[in-house]
Image (cartoon, rainbow, N blue to C red):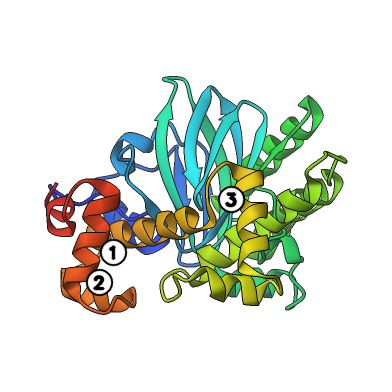
């Protein structure tokens, strides 16, 4: 493995490490070109996870925490996930694992966009492809057990010589539909700052989508059809962090992913993130992280 670069968590990279014998996935994960089934995150995390390092996930994942507690930043927002939590990670998400208890484990199903469209005949539930999705959903014991049985069925089917892949796809769709159903049931609960929270989530979704190229608050205010001052006030009230700080956090997360997960030079990353010049990018990065882009890349 590379000595100074964490492993990117996408299907292609994981399959490469399986082929090289670096990962023994016989009882932990099955990875194909368009889907993956994870039985035990605990068996894989020491191979694939570097704490405090952001990773980009190219494919969506629906997970269930089987035991323990974890803490991660997902698309800029802090989450604590406990046993019984359903976790949704949308395609293109940036996830920064912070810490896990020793007994933390989860199981998951993952599909790429092409398979997702095929499973739903092009009519994919909006929560699977947009900012409407809830990242964490608490499940009761019955829901936990159903999710676990579906994952086990998916694992058994994909390893069966007598059952075809269409049956596996039906089980996969059932898992995705289960998330969609629970997502729709856990709606707004009438909190005082409901409107502020809705605006905040829409803002974060836009920042996650556009921050590679757009860093001005005005851009996001125009997208949301409100003034910069009003948007800034709502974001500050909802999160105790300014809108500009959220934008900067997203840019830094994107930069860290590029620095660690690509062969791009600092100057190329600066251009990709729409900075006027590499000097401006380096000053921006150091101001927010305390180190230079090259220094971070070489860590």
Residue 154 is left or right of residue 74, and the answer is right
Disc 1 vs disc 3: which is toward the camera?
Answer: 1
| Circle 3 SS class | strand
| Circle 2 SS class | helix
Task: Tell me which corner region of the image, top left, top right, bottom left or bottom right, holds residue 47.
Answer: top left
Residue toward you, 236 or 132? 236
Q: Which mark is residue 258?
A: 1
Disc 3 vs disc 2: which is toward the camera?
Answer: 2
Q: Which mark is residue 109?
A: 3
Question: Going from the N terminus, do you reach mark 1 or mark 2 first?
Answer: 1
Alpha carbon distance from label 1 to label 2: 7 Å
Residue at the image point whose x is 73% and y is 51% from the top: 196
Compared to 245, does 152 lie above or below? above
Disc 1 vs disc 2: which is toward the camera?
Answer: 2
Q: Which mark is residue 81?
A: none
Residue at the image point whose x is 64% and y is 54% from the top: 233
Q: Position of residue 131 (x, y in %)?
A: 66, 61
Q: Position of residue 290 (x, y in %)?
A: 21, 46
Q: Residues within 10 Å of mark 2 (few under 14, many from 20)?
A: many
Q: Position of residue 96 (x, y in %)?
A: 41, 45
Mark 2 lies on residue: 269
Q: Residues within 10 Å of mark 3 (few under 14, many from 20)?
A: many
Can the viewer see residue 206 in this picture? yes
Question: Going from the N terminus, do you reach mark 1 or mark 3 first?
Answer: 3
Residue 241 is left or right of residue 255, and the answer is right
Alpha carbon distance from label 1 to label 3: 26 Å
Whether residues under marks 1 and 2 lie with C-beta atoms below 8 angstroms apart, the answer is yes
Q: Position of residue 39 (x, y in %)?
A: 52, 38
């Amino acid at each position: 493995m590379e000595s100074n670069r964490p492993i990117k968590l996408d299907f292609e990279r994981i399959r490469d490490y399986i082929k090289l014998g670096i990962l023994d996935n016989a009882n932990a994960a099955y990875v194909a070109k368009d889907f993956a089934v994870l039985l035990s995150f605990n068996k894989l995390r020491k191979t694939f996870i570097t704490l405090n390092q952001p990773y980009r996930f190219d494919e969506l994942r629906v997970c269930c925490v089987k035991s323990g507690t974890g803490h991660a930043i997902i698309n800029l927002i802090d989450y604590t996930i406990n046993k019984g939590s359903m976790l949704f990670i949308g395609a293109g998400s940036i996830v920064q694992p912070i810490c896990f208890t020793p007994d933390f484990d989860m199981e998951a199903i993952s599909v790429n966009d092409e398979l997702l469209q095929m499973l739903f005949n092009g009519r994919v539930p909006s929560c699977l492809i947009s900012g409407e999705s809830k990242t964490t959903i608490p499940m009761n014991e019955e829901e936990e057990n159903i999710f676990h049985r579906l994952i086990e069925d998916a694992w058994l089917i994909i390893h069966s010589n007598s059952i075809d892949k269409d049956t596996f796809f039906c089980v996969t769709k059932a898992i995705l539909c289960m998330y969609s159903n629970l997502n729709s049931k856990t709606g707004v609960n009438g909190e005082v700052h409901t409107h502020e929270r809705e605006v905040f989530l829409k803002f974060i979704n836009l920042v996650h989508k556009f921050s590679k190229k757009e860093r001005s608050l005005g851009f996001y205010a125009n997208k949301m059809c409100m003034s910069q001052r009003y948007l800034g006030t709502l974001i500050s009230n909802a999160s105790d962090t300014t809108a500009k700080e959220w934008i900067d956090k997203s840019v830094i997360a994107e930069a860290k992913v590029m620095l660690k997960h690509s062969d791009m030079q600092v100057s190329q990353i600066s251009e990709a993130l729409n900075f006027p010049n590499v000097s401006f990018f380096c000053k921006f990065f150091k101001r927010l992280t305390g180190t230079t882009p090259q220094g971070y890349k070489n860590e």
